[in-house]
Image: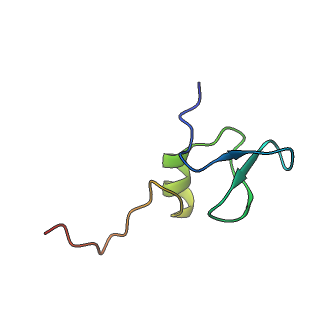
Amino acid sequence: MAKGCKWAERTDEYHGWKCPVTDGACMFLRPDSKACAEEYGEGPDSVEENEDTE
């Protein structure tokens, strides 16, 4: 099975997946949260580089 995305929602529109972050179609045929974060910097797996870890 695909890695999935924590936020992807099944829908009758688009190609079957909606992205609530962009309020449009998921950019991947099979939602992939990590790939979305790497490619677009959005989604539940994206991390701000300037975050303090202390």
Left or right of residue 12: residue 8: left
Up-down relation of residue 28 to residue 44 (above or below): above
Left or right of residue 48: residue 38: right
Residue 54, by quadrant, is bottom left
Up-down relation of residue 29 to residue 20 (above or below): above
Q: Residue furthest top?
A: 1
Left or right of residue 36: residue 53: left
Marks counted in the figure total 0
Query: Measured from the top left, where is residue 30 in percent x and y?
Result: 67, 38
- Residue 35 seen by the camera: yes
Query: Measured from the top left, where is residue 9 in percent x and y?
Result: 68, 47
Query: Measured from the top left, where is residue 36 in percent x and y?
Result: 56, 53
> Which of the pair 47/40 is nearer the observer?
47
Residue at 66% of width from left, 60% of height from top? 20
> Which of the pair 49/10 is nearer the observer?
10
> Which of the pair 27/7 is nearer the observer?
7
Residue at 57% of width from left, 43% of height from top? 32
Query: Measured from the top left, where is residue 44 in percent x and y?
Result: 48, 55
Q: Residue furthest right?
A: 13
Which quadrant is the N terminus positioned in? top right
> Which of the pair 44/35 is nearer the observer?
44
Residue 45, by quadrant, is bottom left
